[in-house]
């Protein structure tokens, strides 16, 4: 609780904890659960704790936004990473038809947009497929030598 007292942005989260709100219960008229508030506040430690206590990471509020949308809107790479690692659905759309990726780009967080674009591409490519120019991630092919290399005098160097 000391951590929560240090940050004025989490007054509503502290209030929820003190009143014993359920981890997935929407506490306000906008149906935002504590996990929405944590993601929207960029509070990765609190978000992690919420996820570990069974928070629904795909729960949507009255705007159709899941915690992933909230994290994307504030540009929190830490929260986005936690949610993606916890298998959040990255293709969920809010009531305006926007994904978290769309919101990241439109809110001016290109690093978050690139991250979510990469994750989306990785999820759509089957592991058995080989990457080529038609896919999201190009394959760089280069020869590698192991153990030794020739110097300019023609002698071999051992590593």
Image (spheres, rainbow, N blue to C red):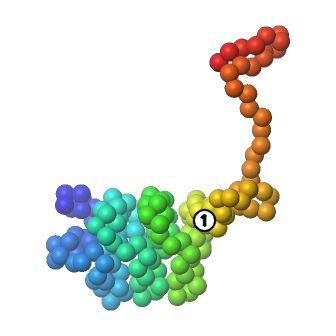
Q: Position of residue 71 (x, y in %)?
A: 46, 68
Please state if 63 lies on the left or on the right of 1 as rendered: right
Location of the N terminus by quadrant is bottom left
| Residue 135 in sight from this viewpoint | yes
- Number of dots carrying numbers: 1
Please state if 77 lies on the left or on the right of 35 as rendered: right
Q: Residue at x 41, y 84 (%)?
A: 61
Determine whether the residue tagged by mark 1 lies in a helix, strand or loop: helix
Q: Residue at x 56, y 75 (%)?
A: 91
Viewer-nearest residue: 123 or 77: 123
Viewer-nearest residue: 99 or 157: 157
**Image quadrant in which you'd find residue 57:** bottom left
| Residue 15 in sight from this viewpoint | no
**Image quadrant in which you'd find residue 123:** bottom right
Q: Position of residue 92 (x, y in %)?
A: 53, 78
Q: Which residue is mark 1?
A: 123
Q: Position of residue 105 (x, y in %)?
A: 60, 69
Please state if 76 lies on the left or on the right of 138 as rendered: left
Please state if 129 lies on the left or on the right of 34 as rendered: right
Q: Residue at x 68, y 21 (%)?
A: 147
**Image quadrant in which you'd find residue 36:** bottom left
Q: Position of residue 23 (x, y in %)?
A: 28, 75
Q: Residues within 10 Å of mark 1 (few under 14, many from 20)?
A: few
Viewer-nearest residue: 15 or 120: 120
Location of the C terminus by quadrant is top right
Location of residue 152 with respect to 111 vertically, above or below:
above
Q: Residue at x 44, y 58 (%)?
A: 78
């Amino acid at each position: 609780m000391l951590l929560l007292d240090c940050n004025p942005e989490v007054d509503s989260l502290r209030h929820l904890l003190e009143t014993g709100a359920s981890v997935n219960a929407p506490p306000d008229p906008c149906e935002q659960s504590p996990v929405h508030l944590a993601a929207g506040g960029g509070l990765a430690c609190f978000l992690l704790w919420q996820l570990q206590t069974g928070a629904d990471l795909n729960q949507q509020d009255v705007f159709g936004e899941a915690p992933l949308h909230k994290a994307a809107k504030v540009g929190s790479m830490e929260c986005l990473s936690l949610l993606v690692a916890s298998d959040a659905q990255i293709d969920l759309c809010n009531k305006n038809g926007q994904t978290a990726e769309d919101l990241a780009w439109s809110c001016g967080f290109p690093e978050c947009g690139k991250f979510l674009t990469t994750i989306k591409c990785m999820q759509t490519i089957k592991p058995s497929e080989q990457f080529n120019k038609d896919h999201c991630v190009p394959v760089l092919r280069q020869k590698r030598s192991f153990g030794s290399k020739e110097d300019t005098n023609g002698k071999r160097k051992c590593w």
